[in-house]
Amino acid sequence: MDVPLVVRWIFEHALRNHASRPIVSREDDGSIVRLTYADFGRRVAQLAGALVEAGIRPGDRVASFGWNSHRHLELYFAVPMIGAVLHTTNIRLFPEQVCWAFEHAGDRLIFVDGSLAPAVERALATKPDFRRPFVVMGPSSASLPDAQDYEAMLARQPDRFDWPELDERSGAILCYTSATTGDPKGVVFTHRSTVLHAFAGGLADALGVRQRDTVMPVVPMFHVNAWGIPFLAPMVGAKLVMPGNRLDPASLIELIEGEGVTISLGVPTVWLAVRDELEKRDLRLPTLHTLVIGGSAVPPSLFDDLERRGIRTVHAWGMTEMSPIGTVSRVHADLEGEPWEKQRDVLLKQGRFTPLVAWKILDDDGRAVPHDGRTAGQLWVRGPAVTGSYYRTGAALPVFDAEGYFATGDVCTIDEFGYLHIVDRSKDLVKSGGEWISSVDLENTIMGHPSVREAAVIGLAHLKWVERPVAVVALREGAALDEPSLQAWLGERLVKWQIPDRVLFVDAIPRTGVGKFLKRELRERYRDLLI
């Protein structure tokens, strides 16, 4: 049957087959809201009625500016199912960037969490002529112009809605890239790509989420749909735990213990802090068996520390342009009987491609690299969940080749089992005296030191070698380490020319809103250090 692949398919499946399964959401004040999927479905219908009453029509963009919560999840379904497009806005943008994002997306209505309303007030102060109606989700001390209360809007509506038939290729969600270089770029996910991505993410050798699981997405819902979990969890009927605005290690551990979380997802920064808290308290989390980590490479020391506490780290890689999941690292059948050290080596790679992704890795001459796990090249991808162009740019940008493949900007190797290993972003490789140094590999080596919490490596201009590596390091709480000691420690593990010329100690390394090292800022801050 020619049945369209639309978000409503997942929604109605969840209500028919998983109606009693729970959704747990922590409010800004720390209280807990408990819903079933049936309750959730009724609230989504009410929200859809409120959106139509507010004048939202098919194709309109509706913004969210919120934490991971049940209300945000309701927007994820109500907005696209009436034919509009949900723009999930990065809540960590600078004030002057917030209104830019709303304007570039062309948002007609903006939903804001109560605790984030002051941040939007500050943004509006930078652009007094900006006018849009707002809806505030939960109590707030701020006063936004033309603001309505979310719960009051829903209370006026019936809990049933006559959903329209939609084209599966129409837009559902609009996300912007994290913009480590240049302005953010918008990517519109269609209903079709969103549903296909949920199917692929649910495979056993991908995220492997089951109905019996309790899933807690710590990765923000503005970061590429929290990696697809808002659609995947309802599709399989998993219990969903939304942590709200309390993302400190103690609060996350409390939720994991209290709700019996089995799978959680987030960037390494989050789990480095949780790891430290677990070690400080000598604590184990018996229900938590899987942490899916993406956004940047998993430090081997973090992988080992969590493994010792019975938590398997599953590395995933992708991009906003890929909806986002491209690869997931699970043990290949041919490696099942191999020693743990060999399995560990592949689990620390970015993983094997999902069925939605066609790929090629090409050298500088455009030839495919051998699958030897050593020869590096540029990664290109295509598929039904890979963007064909950026929002409001007209024709496709010149990051697509003649075959329609998208240039990821990653320098990678691929091994005989199909495991992708990202050597570096092309712009982050350090070329010293004609030799390439991987900043990712160097960062992981540095983070193997017991005193180091995190490290970012950048290449800086050098009069003799053109470019040399410099390490920016943050230490664990209470640790002491100096530059010569760390360089000597690295000298026992690296060849001499790979050792950073300088090690700079900082309290915290600047990051983007989605947890990636902001190397652009570091390069600018220290650009003349070696000259």
Image: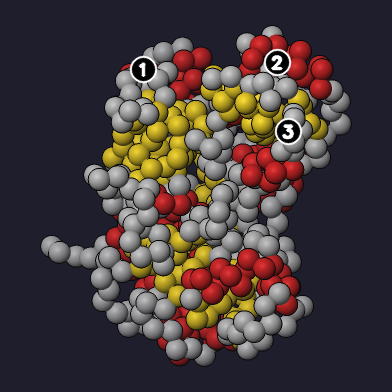
Badge 2 is on which residue? 490
Q: Which residue is mark 3?
A: 472
- Badge 1, how many Cα within 10 Å: few under 14, some, many 20+? few
Q: Verify CB contact (< 8 Å) between mark 1 and mark 2.
A: no
* Mark 3 / mark 2, whichever is N-terminal: 3
Mark-to-mark CA distance, 1 and 2: 27 Å
Q: Residue at x 58, y 48 (%)?
A: 180
Question: Which circle marks residue 383 in the picture?
Answer: none
Residue 4: name its quadrant.
bottom left
Query: Local crowd at mark 2 within 10 Å, few (<14), some, or many (≥20)?
Result: many
Q: Residue furthest front?
A: 463
Residue 13 image position (x, y, % from top left): 32, 63
Q: How is the image coloured?
A: secondary structure
Looking at the image, residue 88 sits to the left or right of residue 119; the answer is left
Q: Earlier in the sequence, mark 1 or mark 2?
A: 1
Residue 471 visible in the displayed image: yes
Q: Position of residue 374 (x, y in %)?
A: 42, 18
Q: Which mark is residue 372?
A: 1
- What amino acid type should be assigned to the residue bearing mark 2? Leu
- Residue found farthest to the left: 1
Q: Secondary structure at mark 1?
A: loop
Q: CA distance from mark 3 to mark 2?
A: 14 Å
- Relative to 184, is 463 above or below? above
Decide if residue 51 is on the left or right side of residue 246: left
Crowdedness near tag 3: few (<14), some (14–19) or many (≥20) residues, C-alpha within 10 Å: many
Q: Real-space Cα distance between discs 3 and 1?
A: 32 Å
Residue 429 is situated, as x and y percent measured from the top left of the image, at 55, 30
Q: Residue at x 74, y 14 (%)?
A: 489
Decide if residue 239 is in sight here: no
Identify whether 210 is placed above or below 58: above
Q: Amino acid at mark 1?
A: Asp
